[in-house]
Image (tube, rainbow, N blue to C red):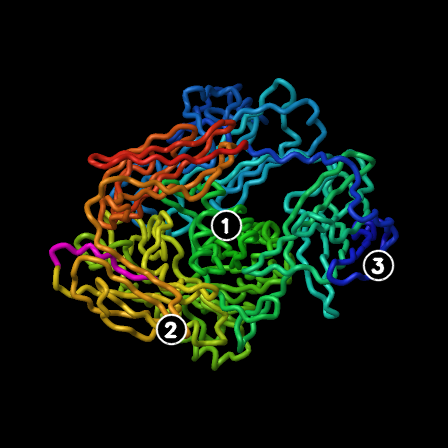
Amino acid sequence: MRRRDLLKLGAVAAVGVPSAAAATQVTTQATGDAAATPPAPGALSGKTARETILLDADWRFHHGDIPFPKVRGDSPTYDSTKAGAAGGAAAIKYDDSGWRALDLPHDFVVEGPFDPDENPAQGYRPKGQAWYRKTFTLPAADRGKQLELRFDGVAVNATVWVNGDVVAHSHSAYSAITVDLTANAHYGDTPNVVAVRVDADPIEGWWYEGGGIYRHVWLVKRPPVHLVADGVYAHPRRREDGRWVVPVEASVGSIAETAKQATVDVVLLDPEGRPAGQARVSGTVNALETTVLRAEILVDAPRLWSVDQPALYKVRTRVAADGQDADELVTPAGFRTQRFDPAKGFFLNDKPLKIQGVCIHQDHAGLGVAMPDSIIEFRLRRLKELGCNAIRSSHNAPTPALLDAADRLGFLVMDENRVFNVSPDYTRMLSWLVRRDRNHPSVILWSVFNEEPLQGTEAGYQMVRRMAKIVKDLDDTRPVTAAINNGMFNPVNVTQAVDVVGFNYQIKEYDRFHAAHPNLPLTSSEDTSAVMTRGEWVTDMKRNVLAAYDDEFRPWGATHRAAWKAIAERPYLAGAFVWTGFDYRGEPQPFTWPTASSSFGIMDLCGFEKTAFYIHQSQWVRDRPVLHLVPHWNWAGREGQPIKVMAFTNCDTVALRLNGKLISEQKNDLYEGLTWQVPYAPGRLEAVGMTGGKVVARASVETTDAPVALRLTPDRSPLAGDGRDAAPIRVEAVDAKGRPVPTAQTPVQFAIEGGRIIGLGNGDANSHEPEKGDRRSLYNGLAQVIVQTTAGAAGPLVVTARAEGLKPATARIAVRPG
């Protein structure tokens, strides 16, 4: 091997820091001819030069396309073809002063009207084109740094210009756009101009995708020798001897004029931020090239990451050359093992764990796809309360904020590729997905497709072989799967090319396939597709509403109860991903206009509970008693008529009483729940749950009086005064005794001080009220207003709600310095 090749491979040094649980001798391992003496524990070299700047603020926006000027004449034609000579709205000197000023993330489609002539699968919203522009300056001190502009997501197609040059074309709403600004940046007083043309008309999915720059935009400044984007891979592994190793791959790039000797220092930080191990490695990086340097950190008895106790470590990687300030990247790390057993299902840290998952889209009431990070975390906290432990990012790369939250909160993630295609453009997207996400302990599966027509063919098999190879070359610690809905018994099919077989809606085929292929791990990658409308108790096809008793489901699916029973009773099935955790815009099945969103969700578009929430909570929660009654008990005019009453619980038995009189006591059926037919009488209907002969839970519904006041309940307080933090506020109408009135449909108007309203919703799939502004009606007793802080604001955020004939309500949310 030539010396140059050896240096590119990199020297390896590893140090194990004794753990508190078991002190061990510190060891050093080195290979190659450039090994360096490891630093003292916790030591790092140089100051940190990397800056990561959020560029979400102060964009200019124009809704609609702006044609490029027609070029006429020989000299203008010649000039227009040169670098920096873009015309029209992409031009450096274009006057955008009349455009709307806004902050990102932004979804311009959700701001528009509903139109019955538009695509129902996309929520009957007009889409079209739009332009964004941003101007910023760079100090002269940035000259010589590596500069990168990153768009986390633009829906759907985009062209990006910087300083009059086309720098990127994107054909996916879900992959990042990364632009190297280093060569054409302006410094000092000369501004840099970014222009983005967005075309939202193409579709990648059969659900609402919105339009615009709907994820974050970042400017990253790095020193000349630096860690490239997604350039650190440090996912812990357990060795055969029981010890743990964190193998570190650091991709080091250089824009220097000559070759440089780079030194990489890596420190593993425990959940409290204390050093738990470290390593150093050195190697040569040639000008305008990238070198991968490898090292290992040995760790004894680390704290394990799990869904119940997500102990999250960090890997801090720094690279420096020739005494320059160091570039630094911090990546998440979780010590955990996983395996899919063909006979016994999924194991996390060698313990069996049923995957209790949901499929989700990036879509929320009032916001469309442009969701602040705090709203993403709110949705995951709602899923945690449900008892959910897994998420499928259907059917695309998730936003980074979702994986960060999944790491912190303890969710397993099936990370899914969008387009089934092995052409270079799309395999690059698959590679990007794996490189970006492979450090997250939450990710347990790579899914390469969903329900593709070629899945039962030789062509599909060959495509999956190639995609699986791409994944395994980048990360061999997690299995590859695919969401398959037919063709699995064909002589050649994709089940022969994946590590874990994922089935969509195949309850009748589980046992047959397992018997035919007992050595193939199997999970349900998507199931259920039951439909219900929150707060509705009679299916009325003329009103486009569906009863919430879990009796309605699509022809390919099953009820929530039947679908989970099929999973729970089969040990060989790893688990399930229910379609879906939340309602989402588009796919209004079984309805068409005026229904503009789906009814598949366990929760509605706001995150308000449907009956499905209590069904799954009773089946999935094991650490506390769960008991809930449906429906409400406001049935004026139906006195004496039987009302279907259901209880969902994890208790042994439930006794039901109406106004103190026992109706009956039933033994619980964990899968089906309990059902009574109760002649209606106003008053209090109470359920008492018992386990082991002791009362452990109570639930009740009461007949309320007419509403007299509004009530506002913020999700949390305080909020950060950074202009980004956001929180939903629950809006209810209550009677004189403070009881929520579940039948209220009251229009409400909102006012805010110390912040801004960024969205409104109520979970009504048939409502065409604007989702922006200051008004929203309650739907079956509930509405939601989403508020956001303003940067630098001092004092509380105050929201007031008013409705005709009702006492107004005020919510005060503390705001801490951003």
Looking at numbered disc 2 in the image, what kind of residue is underneath it?
A: Asp
Please give the residue where the numbered disc 1 appears in the rendered image. Answer: 398
Is 217 within the magenta? no
Disc 1 vs disc 3: which is toward the camera? 3
Please give the residue where the numbered disc 2 appears in the rendered image. Answer: 652
Please give the residue where the numbered disc 3 appears in the rendered image. Answer: 27
Whether label 3 touches label 2, CB < 8 Å: no
Q: Is residue 734 left or right of residue 515?
A: left
Q: Earlier in the sequence, mark 1 or mark 2?
A: 1
Measured in 3D between alpha carbons, the distance from the residue under mark 3 to the one under mark 2, in whole angstroms, is 55 Å
Residue 127 appears in the rendering: no
The image quadrant where one finds the C terminus is top right
**Region in magenta:** 628-638
Judge the density around disc 1: few (<14), some (14-19), many (≥20) Cα neighbours within 10 Å: many
Measured in 3D between alpha carbons, the distance from the residue under mark 1 to the one under mark 3, in whole angstroms, is 40 Å
Nearest the eye: 705 or 760: 705
